[in-house]
Image (cartoon, helix red, strand yellow):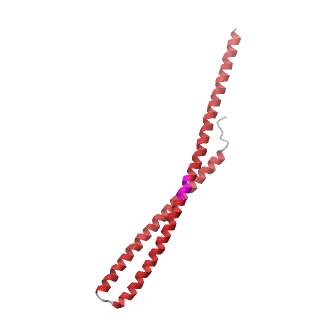
Amino acid sequence: MGFRFNLQRVLDMRKESADQAGRRFEETQRACEHMRAVLRDELDAYFAEREIFNDASRVSAFAQLTSLDRALEARKRRLLEVMTALKEVESDLRLAEQALLLARRDLKAVENLRERRATEWTRAQEEKERKFLDEMTTLRHARKA
């Protein structure tokens, strides 16, 4: 009969929890990267529209200026929305990272306990074997005498 860890179910649950936290962290990381890419795209579009607006204002295309100004204002609002969403996702990322660290810490604690108990069990088995061998040796010597 080999070593049997009486908290194996707890260890398995901690492993699953750490795996879930890792998946959640990776998912949130991808969402964060996506939002950063959206923000870069929105900034690029804003600066391109701003350049068009500046060019139109230089040639005194007043008819175009009004619609371009409205488009720029809409782009600014979109930028603010994206920046707000990015902040929320970054906050979620920090929370997911903390949850992952806690799950890994909890898992490590149970793994360390399992390792200690396995070592203790091995030592106890070795001690039992040593006592048995000593007994056998004593019995053999007693028969010869």
Residue 113 in the figure: left or right of residue 71: right
Residue 24 spot, x, y in % from top left: 55, 59
Residue furthest toward the top?
Answer: 145
Q: Tell me, yes or no, whether the highlighted magenta stretch contains residue 99.
A: yes
Residue 34 placement (x, y as % from top left): 46, 66
Above or below for 142 versus 37: above
The residue at the point 51 percent across, 59 percent down is 26
Tell me which residue sits at (33%, 79%) in the image. 51
Give the camera-side residue of 127 and 144.
127
Up/down of 8 relative to 94, above or below: above
Which residue lies at the image location 41% right of the left edge and 74% below the top edge? 42
Apparent side of residue 21 relative to residue 132 in the rendered image (left or right): left
The image quadrant of residue 124 is: top right
Quarter of the C terminus within the rendering: top right
Q: Is residue 16 above or below residue 134?
A: below
Q: Position of residue 125 (x, y in %)?
A: 64, 30
Residue 109, by quadrant, is top right
Q: How many callouts does the rendering have? A: 0
Residue 4 shown in magenta: no
> Which quadrant would the N terminus be assigned to in this image?
top right
Region of the chain picked out in magenta, as a range: 96-101
- Dominant SS in magenta: helix
Residue extending farthest to the bottom is 63
